[in-house]
Image: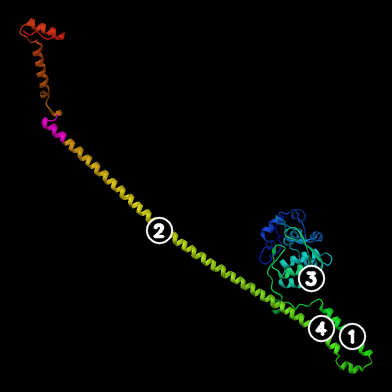
Amino acid sequence: MANRTDPLAKSIRGTNPQNLVEKILRTKIYQNTYWKEQCFGLTAETLVDKAMELDHLGGTHGGSRKPTPFMCLVMKMLQIQPDKEIVVEFIKNPEYKYVRVLGAFYLRLTGTDIDVYRYLEPLYNDYRKLRQKLNDGKFTLTHVDEFIDELLTKDYSCDIALPRIKKRWTLEAIGSLEPRRSALEDDFEEEEEKDEDDQLADGLDSGGNDKDYHRARSPTREKDRDRKRDSHRYRDRDYDRDRDYDRDRDYDRDRGRGRDRDRDRDREKDRDRHRLRDDKDYGRERDRERDREGRERDRRDRDRGRRRSHSRSRSRSRDRRDRDGDDRRRRHRTSTSPKRRGEEPEDARDEPKKKKEKKAKKDDGTDHPDPEIAEQNRLRASLGLKPLKL
């Protein structure tokens, strides 16, 4: 809430007034102790008291780039947006030079081109000293007129990018501003009138004819007048030369910017060309990789099909061998007995047993005609002895 812009504030150059300060510097100001303790709750009336306490100006200083109280008050003015009349009173204040500089800096950020030249150019006549804090934390000596010239001619001041304004000769050409008059011009005119009065008094004292004197031209007066006219002509020539220099400098700057834009455009084209070339190379490499993967997949499929056909042929040969073995066993089985063992008649299976039993009976002597010998043979057969042979 304390860092929010006044809801009644108007937008400056199409944006929030606080956005005229870079975000990094704005964040450092919000985190500064002076901003939290001294700038909280300030209004346009109480801001004057804090401005009167300033003893130096500057942007940021130190390794952590701490903002100065001057920059914190500038940020507070952007936040509350005081009226134009208050800012003009700041600039016209003859007693407190830092109040005047504070108002001039705020007007340079928020004012129009005409207001900037109209209210700041008279400060060229203020030659009072100022203490300015540098980036390394040390102080340097400057003057009010030097600081005003920096605001009107430079693009950067107190670690803030100043908004672009039109050149003075451009505003003069379109009739928005009158040609600048030097503050010494009135003094020159007064000296000229005083010299003419002195020469006129000297002529009257010399006793010459007044009519002839006024009609004639004094060589001394002509010489002084020519000298002063030449001085004005030289001053105008210097002003024209400065204006031509500014115009050439702006042209060179614009041409340099155009050259930088062309260089950046060429660099972008080269970068795009290299990017396209890299994309093409990547596409070719990707196509090669796809082809390689396709060949590997086809080879694996062929190997898999070959192994499958080989296993199928082996299983087929195994089945054929099994069938051949079964046929051989079946043929062998059918050759020994015309009928299957499960289909043989019971009499055929029982005949060998009967033969063995008959033979056994014949051998044990139990079927002897003599009953006593047959009884003895049965007893001996039960005891596991050989039968009697008679």
The extreme top residue here reads: 372
Question: How far across and how far down the image is residue 229, in percent?
Answer: 80, 84
Determine which quarter of the picture holds residue 32.
Answer: bottom right
Q: Residue at x 54, y 66 (%)?
A: 267
Amino acid, disc 4: Lys
What is the C-alpha distance between the residues marked 3 and 1?
A: 33 Å
* Disc number for residue 287: 2
Q: CA distance from mark 4 to mark 1?
A: 16 Å
Say if mark 4 contacts mark 1, CB within 8 Å: no
Q: Earlier in the sequence, mark 2 or mark 4?
A: 4
Image quadrant in which you'd find residue 246: bottom right
Q: CA distance from mark 4 to mark 3?
A: 26 Å
Residue 352, image x and y in percent? 11, 21
| Residue found 89% across the figure and 85% down from its top | 197
Looking at the rendering, the stretch of residues picked out in magenta corresponds to 328-340
> Looking at numbered disc 1 in the image, what kind of residue is underneath it?
Asp
11 vs 387: above or below: below
Asked if the residue at tag 2 contacts the one at tag 1, i.e. Cβ–Cβ closer than 8 Å, the answer is no
Q: Please name the residue that numbered disc 4 is placed on.
A: 228
Q: Residues within 10 Å of mark 4 (few under 14, many from 20)?
A: some
Mark 4 or 1: in front is 4
Residue placed under numbered mark 1 in the picture: 197
**What's the magenta bit mostly, secondary-structure-wise?**
helix
Q: Secondary structure at mark 4?
A: helix
Label 3 amino acid? Answer: Leu
Residues marked 4 and 3 touching at CB (< 8 Å): no
208 with respect to 11 (left or right): right
Give the Cα separation between the discs numbered 2 and 4.
87 Å
Disc 3 designates what residue?
Answer: 123
Query: In what quadrant of the picture does the C terminus appear?
Result: top left
Query: What number is the disc on residue 112?
Result: none
